Image (cartoon, rainbow, N blue to C red):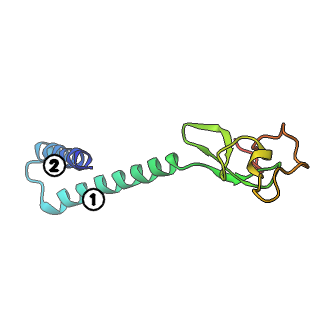
């Protein structure tokens, strides 16, 4: 975390140096506006990065259980309950056992089409 803050501080210093070199008579309000713009860009980037790292969540089109994927593989859907691909495994209940109505060939598939 500290290395990230250090990198951000270095970026701000670099931007101020460039602004002063380009306009030696720059005023404080212009420097502040520059830093605010940099802060906005950094926040937007961090928000996008966080959103990109979150798994996609949906309901399985086959068994109706919650499913998700990961940012590493958006094509591979897993049942949220047990991280399995198979619907039959995901619907296992300790008291009732396997759901024999679900074919063992069913795999996690999102209910909404993905592009």
Residue position for label 1: 36
Question: Which residue is situated farthest in the bottom direction here?
Answer: 29
Which residue is nearer to you in this view: 29 or 80?
80
Q: Where residue 91 appears, x then y in whole percent?
A: 77, 52
Q: Mark 2 packing: few (<14 Cα in 10 Å), some, or many (20+)? A: some
Apparent side of residue 66 relative to residue 8 in the rendered image (left or right):
right
Apparent side of residue 4 relative to residue 26 in the rendered image (left or right):
right
**Closer to the N terminus: mark 1 or mark 2?**
2
Q: Where residue 6 appears, x then y in whole percent?
A: 20, 47
Q: Residue at x 13, y 61 (%)?
A: 28
Q: Residue at x 35, y 52 (%)?
A: 41
Q: Residue at x 26, y 46 (%)?
A: 4
Which residue is nearer to you in this view: 90 or 55?
90
Question: Which residue is situated farthest in the right direction here?
Answer: 101
Total numbered badges shown on the rendered structure: 2
Q: Mark 1 packing: few (<14 Cα in 10 Å), some, or many (20+)? A: few
Q: How many angstroms separate mark 1 from mark 2 (CA)? A: 12 Å
Asked if the residue at tag 2 contacts the one at tag 1, i.e. Cβ–Cβ closer than 8 Å, the answer is: no
Question: Which residue is situated farthest in the left direction here?
Answer: 24
Q: Where residue 86 appears, x then y in whole percent?
A: 76, 41
Q: Which mark is residue 16?
A: 2
Q: Where residue 79 appears, x then y in whole percent?
A: 69, 48
Position of the C terminus by quadrant: top right
Q: Which mark is residue 61?
A: none
**Occupied quadrant, residue 108:** top right
Q: Describe the element under mark 1 as helix, strand or loop.
A: helix
Q: Residue at x 84, y 36 (%)?
A: 105
Q: Describe the element under mark 2 as helix, strand or loop.
A: helix
């Amino acid at each position: 975390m500290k290395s990230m803050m250090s990198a951000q501080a270095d970026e701000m210093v670099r931007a101020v140096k460039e602004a002063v070199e380009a306009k030696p008579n720059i005023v404080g309000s212009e420097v502040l506006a520059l830093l605010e713009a940099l802060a906005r860009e950094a926040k937007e980037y961090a928000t996008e990065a966080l959103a990109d790292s979150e798994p996609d969540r949906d309901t399985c089109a086959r068994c109706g259980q919650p499913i998700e994927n990961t940012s590493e593989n958006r094509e591979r859907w897993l049942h949220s309950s047990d991280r399995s691909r198979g619907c039959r495994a995901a619907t296992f209940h300790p008291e009732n056992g396997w759901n024999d109505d679900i074919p063992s060939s069913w795999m996690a598939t999102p209910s909404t089409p993905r592009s």
